[in-house]
Image (tube, rainbow, N blue to C red):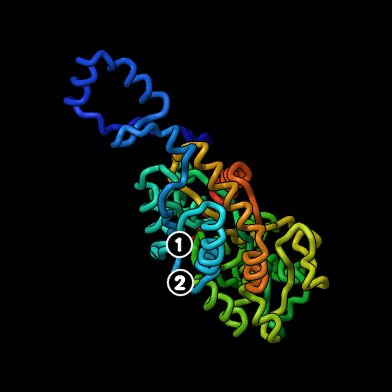
Amino acid sequence: MSRDHRPTTSRRTTLASMAALALSGLLLTGCADNAGGGSNASGEDNGNAAEEFPTQDIRLVVPWAAGGSGDLSARTIAPLLEDELGVSVVVENRPGANGSVAYNWLKEQEPDGYNLSMLGAEVATLQFMDYDIKPDDYAFLGKILEGPGAIAVKADSPYETLEDLIDAAKESPGELTYSSPGVGSVWDNPAQGLQEMAGIELTNVPYDGSAPSIAAAAAGDVDFSIDAMGSQKAQVDGGELRYLAVLTEERVEEYPDVPTAKEQGVDLQNASFTGLMAPAGTPEPVVQKLSDAISSAAQHEDYTSVIEQSNLVPVSESAEEFTEFIQAEEERYGPWIELAKSKQG
């Protein structure tokens, strides 16, 4: 999947200005200049504009409601980006429709680096759920946090290990239930992966978000929950839930006695994540400046301390690394979402 970060050719040249250029003998020169770097309405060369970027305030849109981890990360990193870039970074919430309200808005903006959006896994998955949103619409700037996932059961659940749960599911196909924040969501997808890898059949009970989904597992309304460890942590520490497995490469330091899913025979790893992106076609020098600033801000103690206190993992990932990551997520999630949709009839 390729992304062209070159400036788009200006469409603002009028017939009158073309005639004037022709009369002055500058038409060929003007066309050559425009093809090479583009011009804005004032005639300023876009290549120079990219080198001078930024010269005005930057708008950072959050595709979720205020108060969540994505909103927190945006408002924590914004002042640090201001220090890095020397301009104001204004945070604005545009929630709705699985993030597509903000994502659709962003792809319609000028690709000049002054309008950005936070993003989560939805960018890689919405196309499979019949939204007109796909990774090719954006230039990815950097990942700034992750929320590693875990499988949790009610504290008094008869399932002591992930193997216990899988064995029970094999004995009674379709009878074990799990809660999720919705069909095709970032936490429904690993449940589809678990079924595929373990050769079992489970029943999804979708809820309107992670909070009620996790509460359902804690109340025993479903057999288990797959969600971010940070989101489940309060119920686990409070004795309502118990972790069966963490969906990470290695065990989590805070819970050293909880084995990974991989240790229990299922190499399943999954995490929620948050990063920043711009519209596709943003000039490469602008992408690089933004990526460098984001990477530096995401390593600042003022950012990492806040994120860690929220039971999340601060990450500093470059534009190139993040783009490769999104491509891999798109390829991984597609089959899982199609499987989830097929089960809904």
5 or 238, nearer to the observer:
5
Q: Is residue 38 above or below residue 98?
A: above
Query: How far is the residue under mark 2 from the one under mark 1?
Result: 8 Å
49 or 337, nearer to the observer:
49
Figure label count: 2
Task: Look at mark 1 in the image and give the residue it sits on.
Answer: 62
Pointer 2 local density, CA inside 10 Å: few below 14, some 14–19, many at least 20: some
List the single residue furthest toward the left.
16
Relative to residue 31, is residue 209 drawn left or right? right
Viewport quadrant of the C terminus: bottom left
The spot of residue 281 in percent (x, y) is: 44, 38
Q: Is residue 229 visible?
A: no
Q: Is residue 129 above or below residue 3?
A: below
- Residue 227 lies in quadrant: bottom right
Q: Secondary structure at mark 1?
A: strand
Pointer 1 local density, CA inside 10 Å: few below 14, some 14–19, many at least 20: many
The spot of residue 338 in percent (x, y) is: 51, 52
Residue depicted at 36% across the width and 44% down the height = 110
Task: Look at mark 2 in the image and give the residue it sits on.
Answer: 66
The spot of residue 29 in percent (x, y) is: 34, 17
Residue depicted at 72% across the width and 74% down the height = 243
Residue depicted at 59% across the width and 72% down the height = 177
Amino acid carrying mark 1 in the image? Val
